[in-house]
Image: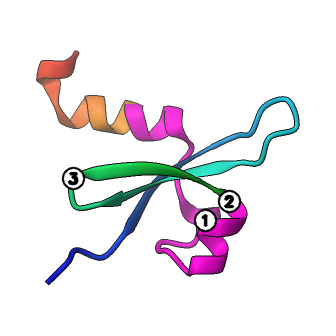
Amino acid sequence: MPEKPQGRYRTSGERGQPNTALVEIGRIGIDIPEQEYRDKGYEPDFDTLPWKAEYCAIAQKDDPQKS
């Protein structure tokens, strides 16, 4: 059974570009625009995704070998 796509974090758009979200499907991660994320109903809700810097800080804290 294929793994369900899962949002990991969001990134603020720059220079007029839309915000994006990193979606992981198994071991593959893709960046998609905010509207596509919302339209496809990915979880968790876009507004509850952490921002990339926050996500990376948490991941680094959880893995001391990356410090």
In this rendering, would 27 be left or right of 46? left
Q: Quadrant of the C terminus?
A: top left
- Determine whether the residue tagged by mark 3 lies in a helix, strand or loop: loop
Pointers 1 and 2 in contact (C-beta within 8 Å)? yes
In this rendering, would 64 be left or right of 60? left
Looking at the picture, which amino acid does disc 2 mark? Answer: Glu
- Magenta segment includes 46: yes
Question: Which dot marks residue 34?
Answer: 2
Tell me the CA gap for discs 1 and 2: 7 Å
Q: Nearer the viewer, residue 46 or 38?
A: 38
Residue at numbered disc 3: 27
Residue occupying image coordinates x 36% and y 70%: 5
Tell me the CA gap for discs 2 and 3: 21 Å
Looking at the picture, which amino acid does disc 1 mark? Answer: Phe
- Magenta segment includes 10: no
Residue at numbered disc 1: 46
- Classify mark 3: residues with Cα within 10 Å, few (<14), some (14-19) or many (20+): few
Residue occupying image coordinates x 85% and y 29%: 15
Span shown in magenta = 34-56
Q: Earlier in the sequence, mark 2 or mark 3?
A: 3
